Image (spheres, grey):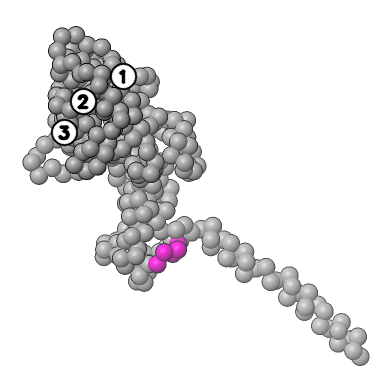
Amino acid sequence: MNSKKQANRSPKQTSDKKSAPAPKKAEAHQAADSERIQKVLARGGVGSRREIERWIDEGRLKLNGETVTLGTRLKTGDHLLINGRVVHWEKFTQQPTRVLLYHKPTGEVVTRRDPEGRPVIFTQLPKLETGRWIAVGRLDINTSGLLLATNNGELANRLMHPSTEVEREYAVRILGEVPDATLEKLKQGVELEDGMAKFNDIRFAGGEGANKWYYVTVSEGRNRLVRRLWESQQVTVSRLMRVRYGPIVLPERLKAHSFYELNDKELDLLFEFAGLERESSVPAMAASPKAKPNRHKPKRS
């Protein structure tokens, strides 16, 4: 009789064991169908991951009526608010990263709106269906040359963050002769109002008469740093152009007011340089105009 009871129980026990993994599958499916809020919003260009995490700490995000905490994940159907405004985050999940190389002319400002009515760089860029263009660093109104713009906030933040120490190279036209001792001092470091600064490298690039060209490199993005370094030694800068940002070089044939979009292979290299994993590759849109990233040579004058 005991054996009969055991026989009656065994099918039920076997069935229970087979059905046990079902909840785990559901949990795995839910995890695969969700992403952390800061990752999704950073991809959409709303802000960097660190900025969004700060907003979360400040209680500025609400998900389905509840205040968001760090670690919260987004899943299909979720209703998200930032500062009381609806965010259509679903579009960000399928948005491929785009990066533009823009040749900024002097006279344009790197801002979305200028109270003085000066031309802004964002009006020169193609429109995005979702998200927004984020400028990687800035160039002041009197500086021309290479400016990167991307719709990927996380990539932009990584390329701008001081800890990354991305090297920037500039072509500088100065007035008059510069003694070797001054050049050496600029490489050793000088005290500015916001701390010590220096050029990583200075190379003479020729010139005739009063105008001389130099290539200089820095690993900081402080405001007007290149100009301030030269001016600290009473050297007048008459023209300043950025020709490289990290591994990206201003294409020689790219005219002012024009942009070039990185292709799929170039994006892979940029993500690798930034130490980030790229989303699934999507063919980049046609660049306008086409240009090869050859080293830019400044015009002599």
Q: Which residue is mark 2?
A: 240
Residue sitting nearer the eye, 38 or 261: 38
Residue extending farthest to the left is 116
Q: Is residue 300 above or below residue 270?
A: above
Residue sitting nearer the eye, 178 or 108: 178
Q: Which residue is mark 1?
A: 203
Please tell me whether mark 1 sits on a helix, a strand or a loop: strand
**Residue 118 seen in the figure:** yes
Residue at 25% from the left image edge and 21% from the top image edge: 181
User: Which badge, 1 or 3, is on the more N-terminal residue?
Assistant: 3
Res 167 quadrant in image: top left
Identity, as a three-letter code, of the amino acid under mark 3: Ile
Instruction: Let me know if residue 127 is in the magenta part.
Output: no
Please tell me whether mark 2 sits on a helix, a strand or a loop: strand
**Residue 282 seen in the figure:** no
User: Which badge, 2 or 3, is on the more N-terminal residue?
Assistant: 3
Q: Which mark is residue 178?
A: none
User: Which stretch did the figure color magenta?
Assistant: 69-73
